[in-house]
């Protein structure tokens, strides 16, 4: 008689099988992958220069040269080619993107807004504006393709910021609570003093330098931000060092509890009580328009949900047997928290991240629609939708960007619901 061997699946494998059975969520995942590919290859799909071309016997890769100048600061264009109009140039041969317009390029032949089915002034059928133009003559399809990159970047970066803050603070609050973490009184008071003084010299004193770097480029801002962190860390360390001597005294050596859970919970309650949308509008309105500022503001104001999820999971995980066994073996708390407890507490956080990306894209689109925070020259889905207000009768400026925003937000919501159902053990048992 043949023996039946039962194959045991890990919780992760069972969750993946459950997720694949949810067809809307599974297809949404592949659509997100497709959107990511479009965002990465946006310049190869819609641009006003060839992907590769031959000019007077010389093979040129214009898009890669633009990448080198834009991202690396290199000067790769000869004076003759720098301002050349590639669509009118006499090329030996060329491989063009599907859409031969850059998102910010103005086609003054087709202004005011020309519809996708209207009569367009073009030199050849390959130069047609497939979804029409706005009042400035910008190609709508090119703007939608490049707007995919901006929307996904805003969603991923802002949620990445909020996830780092929320996971860290939630893990601290859930694992240590109010009684588990003890430090000497000297370490506590000198450490707090060092943090405040470090933040003052690292960020408040350098606020103008950070603002100027933010207006220049993303990499300049990262460099300036790194300098501020180094200054803050060095200042805090210098102030904290005397605590090693004070710990030998009776007053300084006394151990005190850190009320981590209470402190983090009160900060979460304060952040929740603040009008987040109004705060984003205020910061974006008074600061210099910058896409990176928009991402930072959204990330710094939307971490509370992730922190609460992480805290709740850590409260359950910290009392499990394998955590107690790790403590009995003498492992330090920081190792147990980050290497053992936290990886098993992140499943619900994935749901919050998926919904957070959709929310961030919606907030950025709203800011762009109102003309707040994002530079006027940056083409986003919200700015394209806003152009419909000044173009009476240009239905394509409202329909296509609106459909893009609605579709992407719906896709990420379906993805979040699919992840939530897949990791729910009650649904897996059915």
Image (cartoon, rainbow, N blue to C red):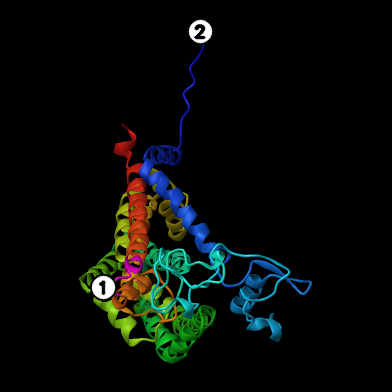
- Residue 408 is left or right of residue 178, and the answer is right
Q: Which mark is residue 1?
A: 2
On the image, the x and y values in percent for residue 251 come to 34, 79
Task: Determine the secondary structure under disc 1.
Answer: helix
Between 418 and 82, the residue placed more toward the observer is 82
Q: Is residue 26 visible?
A: yes
Write the start and end of the magenta stretch as one range.
392-398
Which residue was labeled with disc 1? 276
Residue, far top = 1
On the image, the x and y values in percent for residue 382 come to 35, 71
C-alpha separation, residue under disc 2 versus residue under disc 1:
67 Å
Residue in the picture at 26% in, 71% down: 271
Residue in the picture at 22% in, 74% down: 275
- Residue 75 is left or right of residue 155, and the answer is right
Q: Is residue 176 visible?
A: no
**Residue 59 appears in which quarter of the rendering?**
bottom right
On the image, the x and y values in percent for residue 359 come to 32, 63
On the image, the x and y values in percent for residue 106 come to 48, 79
Residue in the picture at 45% in, 90% down: 206
Image vertical order of residue 288 relative to residue 13, above or below: below
Residue in the picture at 42% in, 72% down: 133
């Amino acid at each position: 008689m043949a023996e039946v061997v039962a194959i045991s699946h890990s919780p992760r494998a069972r969750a993946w099988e459950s997720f694949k059975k949810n067809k809307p969520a599974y297809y949404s995942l592949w659509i997100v992958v497709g959107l990511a590919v479009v965002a990465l290859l946006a310049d190869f799909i819609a641009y006003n220069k060839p992907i590769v071309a031959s000019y007077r016997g010389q093979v040129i890769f214009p898009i890669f040269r633009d990448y080198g100048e834009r991202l690396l600061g290199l000067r790769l264009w000869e004076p003759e080619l720098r301002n050349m109009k590639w669509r009118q140039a006499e090329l030996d041969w060329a491989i063009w993107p599907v859409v031969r317009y850059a998102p910010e390029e103005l086609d003054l032949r087709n202004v005011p807004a020309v519809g996708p089915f209207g009569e367009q002034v073009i030199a050849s059928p390959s130069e047609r504006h497939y979804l029409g133009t706005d009042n400035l003559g910008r190609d709508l399809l090119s703007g939608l393709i490049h707007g995919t990159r901006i929307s996904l970047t805003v969603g991923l970066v802002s949620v990445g910021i909020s996830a780092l803050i929320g996971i860290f603070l939630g893990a601290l609050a859930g694992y240590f609570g109010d009684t588990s973490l003890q430090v000497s009184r000297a370490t506590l008071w000198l450490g707090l003093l060092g943090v405040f003084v470090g933040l003052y010299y690292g960020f408040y004193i350098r606020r103008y330098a950070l603002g100027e770097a933010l207006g220049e480029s993303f990499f300049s801002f990262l460099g300036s931000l790194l300098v501020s962190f180094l200054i803050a860390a060095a200042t805090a360390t210098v102030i904290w060092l005397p605590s090693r001597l004070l710990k030998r005294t009776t007053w300084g050596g006394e151990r005190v509890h850190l009320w981590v859970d209470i402190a983090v919970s009160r900060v979460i309650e304060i952040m929740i009580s603040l009008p987040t949308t109004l705060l984003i509008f205020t910061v974006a309105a008074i600061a210099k328009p910058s896409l990176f500022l928009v991402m930072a503001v959204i990330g710094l104001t939307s971490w509370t949900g992730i922190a609460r999820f992480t805290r709740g999971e850590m409260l359950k995980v910290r009392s499990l047997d394998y955590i107690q066994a790790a403590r009995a073996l003498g492992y330090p708390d920081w190792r147990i928290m980050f290497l053992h407890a936290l990886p098993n507490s992140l499943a619900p956080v994935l749901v919050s991240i998926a919904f957070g990306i959709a929310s961030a894209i919606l907030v950025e689109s709203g800011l762009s629609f109102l003309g707040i925070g994002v530079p006027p020259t940056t083409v986003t889905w919200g700015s394209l939708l806003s152009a419909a207000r000044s173009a009476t009768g240009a239905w394509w400026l409202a329909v296509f960007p609106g459909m893009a925003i609605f579709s992407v937000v719906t896709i990420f919501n379906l993805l979040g619901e699919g992840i939530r159902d897949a990791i729910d053990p009650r649904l897996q048992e059915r």
